[in-house]
Image: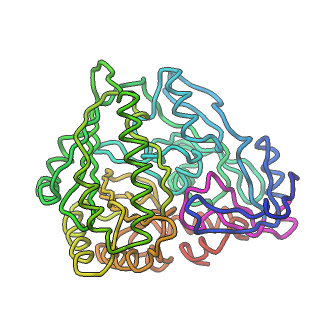
Amino acid sequence: MGSTASGKSGTWRNWGGNVTVRPAREVTPASVDELAAAVRQAAEDGLKVKAVGSGHSFTAIAATDGVSIRPQLLTGIRRIDRKAMTVTVEAGTPLKRLNVALAREGLSLTNMGDIMEQTVSGATSTGTHGTGRESASLAAQIKELELVTADGSVLTCSEKDNPDVFAAARVGLGALGIVTAITFAVEPLFLLTAREEPMPLDRVLAEFDQLRAENEHFEFYWFPHTGNTNTKRNNRSAGPPQPVGQLAGWFEDEFLSNGVFHAAQLVGRAAPAVVPAIARVSSRALSSRTYTDIPYKVFTSPRRVRFVEMEYAVPREALVDTLQELRAMVDRSDLRVNFPVEVRTAPADDIALSTASARDSAYIAVHMFRGTPYQAYFTAAERIFTAHEGRPHWGKVHTRDADYFAQVYPRFGEFTALRDRLDPERLFQNDYLRRVLGQ
């Protein structure tokens, strides 16, 4: 089954560079039948199985020393149902390809995260989300899932079929089976007007509820060591389209957000003492801009500067306190934080292990440039987040375990019971799942 990689090519590394693993074999199935056969073969050989997407998780959620399933041949749109307004895609399809293909068909997802390098199954299985007043994570837009379970059978689930599996598998952490296809709700292509504008942190926090309530999609970035933020409001628009000009787009998105930002990160890593000065300059260099375009061109942007990230969802009403505690912690520490803190929101959803499960949530993400020591900062931040019953993003750095999750997820037991039923032998187990879901 598939090819067994050897030598250097057999080593898998994630995007953030903080997880490296060498699987016993790699399989690149060209069909669901081939994938199911690979799962049965692995069980016979006594090997664990994990599917791996584009490696955008900072945790070892996809790592295995057993069989690593690569989904790059399981890509593309299976079908578009214009009556039901759904699209069914193969699990290995990168979000970028999905977004471009949908736009060509005059369709779009309702909401999405801020990058689109991930595969649809990797992004949804870890609970990837953007920001939204009414519209939630990618997983919350799923209408049907197809997965290969531990016995090699193909299971389809939706609100009608196997609803108990559907309630959990949309954010399944790779623990319940290997997702082979996803059906998303879509809508006719629409336009969004983005308004980006710098704003003092004190004002953003004072007006946070209002900013969130008045905008379909509100987010902001706070620059530690400063009182400055950059806010972004995305709202539906009747048009006309007014995309960011090519030169302005290159200057803002490539030169400032990737090029100069990367240079600033290198300087900050070499000389941490200058970080606060860099933060003051870079947070002031931002100017306001407004543009109108189709959703994926507004929601997503290129991220070429490699980093490591921790993100927690806290109850939305706890956001202001949490952020003020984070700011006070940075100010009284000797930490030098060169990366903005990203804040987004999501409405409550009905998925067992979604970070927004049954509670309106605010997300706070802390980042550090790749290669910069991040442990002290992340440890101090995590202490603040967990004091507010925060739930970490499944694909980002955290130190929580099953005991903690049983406290902050009301439906944790429902998920683990389903796993006991679908994967009693723990074929899809790895060290990460052992920690977060228990034995």
- Dominant secondary structure, magenta: loop
Quadrant containing the C terminus is: bottom right
Which residue is depicted at the point 43% across and 66% down?
368
Question: Residue 361 at what x, y percent from top left?
Answer: 31, 58
From the viewer's perspective, is residue 27 above or below residue 239?
A: below
- From the viewer's perspective, is 63 left or right of 213? right
Residue segment shown in magenta: 41-66
Which residue is depicted at the point 22% across and 52% down?
284
Which residue is depicted at the point 55% across and 67% down?
59
Magenta span contains residue 407? no
Question: Residue 325 at what x, y percent from top left?
Answer: 22, 74
Nearer to the camera, 177 or 2: 2
Residue 334 image-quadrant placement:
bottom left
Which residue is depicted at the point 35% across and 26% down?
243
Number of numbered markers: 0
Magenta span contains residue 43? yes
- From the viewer's perspective, is 58 left or right of 278? right
Nearer to the camera, 291 or 164: 291
Question: Residue 166 at what x, y percent from top left?
Answer: 54, 50
Question: Residue 393 at what x, y percent from top left?
Answer: 45, 62
Nearer to the camera, 121 or 195: 195
From the viewer's perspective, is residue 180 above or below residue 420?
A: above
Nearer to the camera, 118 or 10: 10
Residue 46 image-quadrant placement:
bottom right
Chosen colour scheme: rainbow
- From the viewer's perspective, is 154 left or right of 351? right
